[in-house]
Amino acid sequence: MASLRDIRNRIGSVKNTRQITRAMKLVSSAKLNRATQAATSARPYQQALERTLQRVVGAVGGAVEHPLLRLPNNENDVLVVVMTADRGLCGNFNSIINRAAQLKVEELVAAGKNVRIYCYGKKGRQHLARRGFTVADSVVDLNPKAYPAIADELSLRLQRELAEDAFSEVFLAYNRYRSVLSQEPTVERILPMQLEVPATPEGEVAEGVDFLFEPDASSLLARLLPMSLRTRLFQALLETQAGEQAKRMTAMDAATRNASELINRLTLEYNRARQAAITKELIEIVSGAEAL
């Protein structure tokens, strides 16, 4: 049985841990409000951009040519971009997207593809490197204020590599933020881009869209496609940040509650042990008095 000193030391240790988890919960809660607002505020822009693209595609028709739509002269190389957090203590946030990315990489390797991996966040790089996958490049210690610059740089890099036929496809793996309790692991192809011609409610292809474009629709489409790619990357970074803070807040809240429950149990155990020690001392005193 543990001594009173051991139990008292353990209670103090758990209390210190509870203070840390409580502070982390408060910090994550404050960051979550900003991250959620940023992610949800950017969605309408991305959705409006996608609707505008559909309208322009409908005006241009089927003959659309652009480097981002061109099929590369490369059938063997595939690029996978993985976005995770830099830190842990956020529940299963990193593990679920790491598993999804790993399954995709294994699927591509089984199909005979040469897979290159770009990681944004330490946890993705560590997970894939430990399992024997080669991480071609990584960006860590991400700052949310630098997300626009990161998205611009990655977008330009992917466009340049696509023009050089460095890969046949690009897949983006990240956690899509749904709510504080729900993040959806998502692996989607982002290059070469695919355009969908809008359809009428009856399912027929819309023709003669009643919009005027200045400049012409083809020139406008050439400007919108790189913008759409950059926006998707930027949105993925925002979704990742919001999901990370949501998972960390809930994880630290659960850890704080567990610590409180453990303190209550240890306190009860301490009081019982202390009572038993006092009773034993009283019995020894009474026995000694009777012996005299």
Image: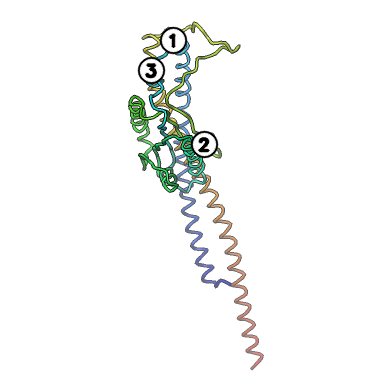
Residue under pointer 2: 185
Q: N-terminal of the two: label 2 or label 3?
A: 3
The answer to whether the residues at label 3 and label 1 have Cβ atoms under 8 Å apart is: no
Outermost residue, right direction? 290
Q: Quadrant of residue 271?
A: bottom right
Q: Which mark is residue 134?
A: none
- In the displayed structure, would residue 58 be above or below residue 16? above
Alpha-carbon span between mark 2 and mark 1: 34 Å
Q: Measuring 51% from the left and 36% from the top, which residue is drawn there?
A: 185
**Residue 228 horizontal/vertical position (percent):** 41, 23
Residue under pointer 3: 66
**Residue 63 horizontal/vertical position (percent):** 43, 11
Outermost residue, front direction? 112
Give the residue type that dot 1 points to: Val
The quadrant of the picture occupied by the C terminus is bottom right
Q: Nearer the viewer, mark 3 or mark 1?
A: 3
The answer to whether the residues at label 2 and label 1 have Cβ atoms under 8 Å apart is: no
Q: Quadrant of residue 59?
A: top left
Q: N-terminal of the two: label 2 or label 1?
A: 1
Q: Nearer the viewer, mark 2 or mark 3?
A: 3
Is 162 left or right of 280, judged from the image as shown? left
**Residue 16 horizontal/vertical position (percent):** 47, 58
Out of 212 and 228, give the one closest to the viewer: 228
The quadrant of the picture occupied by the N terminus is bottom right
Q: Measuring 41% from the left and 33% from the top, which residue is drawn there?
A: 79
Out of 40 and 176, give the one closest to the viewer: 176
Residue under pointer 1: 60
Q: N-terminal of the two: label 3 or label 1?
A: 1
Give the residue type that dot 3 points to: His
Alpha-carbon span between mark 2 and mark 3: 30 Å
